[in-house]
Image (cartoon, helix red, strand yellow):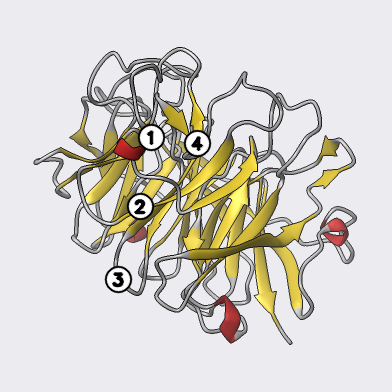
Amino acid sequence: MKTRYFLPLLLAPLALAAWVPNPAAPAADANLSKIKLPAGFTISYFAQGVKSARELALGPDGTVYVGTKDDKVYALPDRNKDGRADEVITLATGLNAPNGVAVHEGNLYVAEISRILRYDNVAAHLRQVPKPAVVYGKLPSKEWHGYRYIAFGPDNKLYVPVGAPCNSCLPEAPIFATINRMNPDGSGLETYAYGVRNTVGFDWSPRDQALWFTDNGRDMLGDNLPADELNRAAGPGQHFGFPYFFAGDVPDPQLSKGKSMATYVKPARKLGPHVAALGMKFYTGRQFPAQYRNQILIPEHGSWNRSSKIGYRITLVKLDASGQQAIGYETFAEGWLQGQKSWGRPVCLLVLPDGSLLVSDDQNDAVYRISYKG
């Protein structure tokens, strides 16, 4: 392994370009054989050894970028297009939980807890990443619900959520429990959605460009309350209930007094209780059968304090012909949880140009590829 080191830079993380060959996939992987998928689908490793893999983003040349809850950001090139990354390249290290990654006009945006960085023309510098620009440096530094999921919307704005700094509380500043957007240069920050406890996954409908997002319900109300949420924001300025109501019909025992749920937007779909629904995506590819197109796939990271574990799977939310109403909720992929012990936790999805689906896993330190062969 060849590694190059550079001295830390002021106001910038240590830039590091380390690369290792992607370990060869075993002939028969005992864990992957546990994953149950619909008929005709297969799962394989796209990359292994990607520690704490979280959000995924695709560069124009096909390179996949991976944020983490650790301190690193990775690049996974697949130059020969064989459905497996050629190598695992460490782009940067010394970051503060760089969960969020997004690519815009060839530049890689990375969201730490309190700031957003930009690595210009990143594909040309995978071996020696230059000092990043600080796009926005005034996000809250609180770690509770501090992982940032970022993405560029159809309006060319960069969207970034700020979760509540608590289980359930009146936010101490207006920025908490919101989804925000800004210009690519970090200017013009504005709040798009209010009352969002903790979203770590959102996407835009390919039909009407409405923003859909997952939201994690509060804890300490029992095993089965409240449900996690899938929400649809028809436009800016809507309030989705936190901290007064959860899942559309579960009042907060202390904070809901004097409030009416009718004031707030109800979820488009209730999900499982405490499943930790994260990096959802509309399936916009052409490889999967027609019934999956423009439908929503949701990685459920899995419960952490439920007496009987739930989640640790990918679910499918079916929409009606208009694309505005959720009419079904079912399991698409499962097997990361065996009994009450998990060996993996799916986090984020990414649809590749060939129509296959990537899935990150921050427990098994891997990125999988789900494909359909019929």
Q: Are the residues at dot 2 and dot 3 in contact (C-beta closer than 8 Å)?
A: no
User: Residue 151: percent from the left, percent from the top?
Assistant: 33, 52
The residue indicated by pointer 3 is: 208
The earlier-in-sequence mark between 2 and 3 is 2
Cα separation between marks 3 and 4? 27 Å
Q: Are the residues at dot 2 and dot 4 in contact (C-beta closer than 8 Å)?
A: no
Q: Residue at x 34, y 15 (%)?
A: 170
The earlier-in-sequence mark between 4 and 1 is 4
Residue mark closest to the camera, 1 vs 2: 1
The residue indicated by pointer 2 is: 102
Hey, what amino acid is under mark 3?
Asp
**The C terminus: image quadrant:** bottom right
Q: Are the residues at dot 1 and dot 2 in contact (C-beta closer than 8 Å)?
A: no
Cα separation between marks 2 and 3? 22 Å
The residue indicated by pointer 4 is: 249
Q: Is 253 left or right of 119, judged from the image as shown?
A: right
User: Residue 180: percent from the left, percent from the top?
Assistant: 24, 40
Q: Is residue 284 above or below residue 100?
A: below
The earlier-in-sequence mark between 1 and 2 is 2
